[in-house]
């Protein structure tokens, strides 16, 4: 189920994994691992930003630029995850690998934004970051 | 709905009311009344002291009205003009904080019809009044001459304003007079008004309520002197050398003739550097003085008494500092006084400093974004009123505080020019270290955001003021730890 979901998600933009002899490795190991890590790490980053930095600790990192910094850090991590996964599973590096990393980065941006919108209301200092919508108060 | 009618008589009356407004803005609680009705009595319609107090009162009222009725917090005390106390728009008098003298601009001589008097009466008038008294125009006030003031002010009891005041006076309302004893308007006005209010034969409406009304007075003894013109120079001036003599005479009169008063407060100080000698009009705009701030506390103290306390015995107070110091800090005030004003003034000062210096940088902070504070500051007139109250060069809080620091004996409890919150309170500074930065923009905004979380009001002005009330309270209690 998870394998199918993440394979479908990545192959939607990337097409069939290359080189062809590693297609199954991608589908059975790399895509699900990368996808799961992406979701968990992004969720952790959002929680770190809204609930640790801007609720428990109240660090003052509540501005949009601070949110963007977290988004970018998450994006860098998201770019690195596929490369590490590919490397750790003995898969030959290919231009596909970098495209995969790029797509994972794009997904990280979308996911970070979505989690932000869903979770920001619980933050004291940053519930209006990056924007007030959809919360009213 | 008990009311307190505060009669601010003359320049000192206006200046004390100015300080009272600052205390009310800071949230100092005035007990046992729901509304304060300041009535400024000064024939000098151009008087600088009076006009800036009136502007301040108007600004305060707008801010209070926007914030609505509350039991505590900044600007929570309700104030009203005399004409609006009826509440039904039925009043026929001018809607103003100032008693309307109707533009008396003739010399005193014409006012009393000197030229129409017979020769014996003229001789009597000549005996009681100097040539200058007779020829001076009344639109500048009485130039420190209570003998002139007592004649002119005796007539105001018949005025529509006083009848309106009496008609709307209810059992339970209180009266407080603020006046100087050494000038003209105040020295004459206070005993006259008191006598008339307490005299049932005068024929004012509600005479019984007025007669039995709890009444207090702040009698300001000499606390400043005025520059004297050089010998031989012809100048229109008030002779401050007579202040002490006049004060002694008036006190002696009060000793035997002040009937119907429940509490009297006295305050004075050794005059320091003489002030510019301006007998009246716009140029009479003296710097705020510590004595005026402390005099305003008399009103707070008077209202702290319950009805029974005041009915059972008359009380007399004289203000004293703990130490005779030039730079008066909160620690130099008696603990009771300190408890009444210190925390409130510190909180208001924090609010003013942060609001004027840092709020413009907080566009992205949750407390500001949540109510679109920046848009509201640009577009809503009430924020302009708040700006005026805090920053107006003539009557704003900043200038009031600066003026209080210009005399030899200064109110130095709050460091006016200090931008570091940790050093703003003279007698309590916050120790900072590597891990503890005390109160700074970051910690302030954090408290504002926290405070705004629990505020359900969506109005930007009300929500912001409430957030500042909660935040400054927390900062004073937890960071400054002021006790």
Image (cartoon, grey):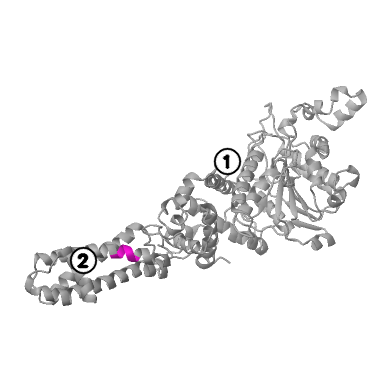
Residue B364, how many percent across, how many down? 40, 55
Q: Which chain carries label 2?
A: A
- Residue sitting nearer the eye, B246 or B257: B257
Residue B134, disc: none
**A2 with respect to B300 (left or right):** left
Q: In which quarter of the image is the N terminus of chain B?
A: bottom right
Q: Quadrant of the C terminus of chain B?
A: bottom right
The answer to whether any part of residue B118 appears in the image is yes
Residue neighbourhood size for the residue with mark 2, other residues' Cα within 10 Å, grouped as few (<14), some (14–19), many (≥20) = many
Residue A12, how many percent across, how many down? 19, 65
Give how far apart the Cα atoms at labels 2 and 1 are. 62 Å
Magenta residue span = A111-115
Q: Name the residue under label 2.
A: A104
Residue B342, above or below B94: below
Which is closer to the viewer, label 2 or label 1?
2
Quarter holding residue B150? top right
**B96 with respect to A20 (left or right):** right
Give the SS element for disc 2. Answer: helix
Q: Mark 1 points at which residue?
A: B394
Quarter holding residue A28? bottom left
Residue neighbourhood size for the residue with mark 1, other residues' Cα within 10 Å, grouped as few (<14), some (14–19), many (≥20) = some
Residue A100, how many percent across, how many down? 16, 66
Magenta stretch: dominant secondary structure: helix
Residue B431, how many percent across, how many down? 46, 65
Give the SS element for disc 1. Answer: loop
- Residue sitting nearer the eye, B143 or B88: B88
- Residue sitting nearer the eye, B171 or B41: B171
Q: Does the magenta stretch include residue B92?
A: no
Q: How many labels does the image show?
A: 2
């Amino acid at each position: 189920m998870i394998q199918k979901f993440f394979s479908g998600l990545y192959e939607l933009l990337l097409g069939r994994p290359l080189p062809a002899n590693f297609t199954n490795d991608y589908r059975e190991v790399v895509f699900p691992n990368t996808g799961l890590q992406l979701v968990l790490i992004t969720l952790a980053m959002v929680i770190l930003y809204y609930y640790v930095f801007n609720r428990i600790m109240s660090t003052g990192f509540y501005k949009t630029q601070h949110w963007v910094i977290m988004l970018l850090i998450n994006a860098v991590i998201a770019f690195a995850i596929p490369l590490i996964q590919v490397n750790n599973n003995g898969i030959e590096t290919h231009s596909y690998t970098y495209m995969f990393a790029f797509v994972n980065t794009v997904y990280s941006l979308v996911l970070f934004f979505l989690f932000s919108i869903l979770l920001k209301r619980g933050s004291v200092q940053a519930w209006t970051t990056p924007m007030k919508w959809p919360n009213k108060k | 709905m008990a009311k307190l009618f505060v009669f601010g008589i003359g320049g000192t009356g206006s200046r004390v009311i100015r300080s009272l407004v600052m205390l009310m803005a800071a949230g100092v609680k005035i007990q046992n009344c729901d509304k304060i009705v300041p009535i400024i009595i000064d024939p000098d319609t151009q008087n600088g002291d009076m006009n800036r107090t009136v502007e301040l009162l108007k600004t305060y009222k707008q801010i209070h009205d926007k914030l609505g009725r509350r039991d505590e917090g900044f600007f929570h005390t309700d104030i009203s003009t005399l004409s609006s106390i009826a509440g039904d728009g039925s009043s026929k008098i001018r809607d103003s904080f100032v008693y309307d003298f109707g533009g008396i601009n003739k010399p005193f001589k014409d006012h009393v019809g000197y030229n129409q008097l017979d020769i014996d009466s003229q001789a009597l008038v000549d005996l009681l009044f100097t040539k200058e008294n007779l020829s001076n125009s009344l639109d500048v006030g009485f130039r420190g001459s209570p003998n002139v003031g007592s004649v002119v002010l005796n007539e105001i009891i018949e005025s529509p304003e006083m009848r309106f005041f009496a008609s709307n006076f209810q059992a339970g309302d209180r009266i407080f007079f603020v006046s100087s004893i050494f000038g003209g308007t105040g020295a004459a006005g206070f005993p006259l008004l008191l006598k008339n209010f307490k005299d049932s034969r005068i024929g004012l409406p509600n005479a019984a309520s007025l007669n039995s009304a709890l009444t207090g007075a702040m009698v300001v003894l000499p606390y400043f002197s005025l520059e004297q013109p050089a010998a031989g120079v012809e100048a229109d001036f008030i002779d401050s050398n007579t202040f002490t003599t006049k004060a002694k005479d008036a006190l002696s009169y009060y000793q035997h003739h002040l009937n119907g008063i429940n509490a009297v407060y006295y305050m004075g100080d050794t005059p320091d550097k003489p002030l510019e000698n301006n007998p009246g009009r716009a140029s009479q705009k003296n710097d705020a003085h510590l004595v005026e701030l402390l005099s305003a506390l008399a009103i707070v103290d008077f209202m702290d008494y319950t009805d029974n306390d005041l009915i059972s015995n008359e009380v007399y107070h004289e203000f004293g500092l703990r130490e005779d110091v030039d730079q008066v800090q909160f620690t130099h005030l008696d603990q009771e006084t300190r408890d009444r004003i210190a925390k409130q003034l510190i909180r208001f000062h924090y609010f003013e400093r942060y609001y004027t210096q840092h709020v413009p940088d907080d566009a992205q902070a949750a407390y500001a974004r949540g109510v679109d504070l920046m848009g509201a500051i640009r577009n809503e007139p009430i924020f302009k009123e708040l700006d005026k109250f805090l920053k107006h060069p003539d009557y704003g809080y900043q200038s009031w505080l600066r003026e209080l620091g210009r005399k030899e004996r200064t109110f130095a409890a709050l460091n006016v020019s200090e931008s570091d919150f940790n050093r703003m309170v003279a007698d309590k500074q916050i120790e900072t270290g590597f891990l503890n930065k005390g109160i700074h923009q970051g910690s302030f905004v954090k408290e504002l955001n926290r405070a705004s979380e629990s505020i359900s009001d969506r109005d930007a002005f009300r929500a912001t003021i409430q957030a500042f009330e909660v935040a400054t309270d927390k900062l004073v209690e937890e960071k400054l730890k002021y006790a």
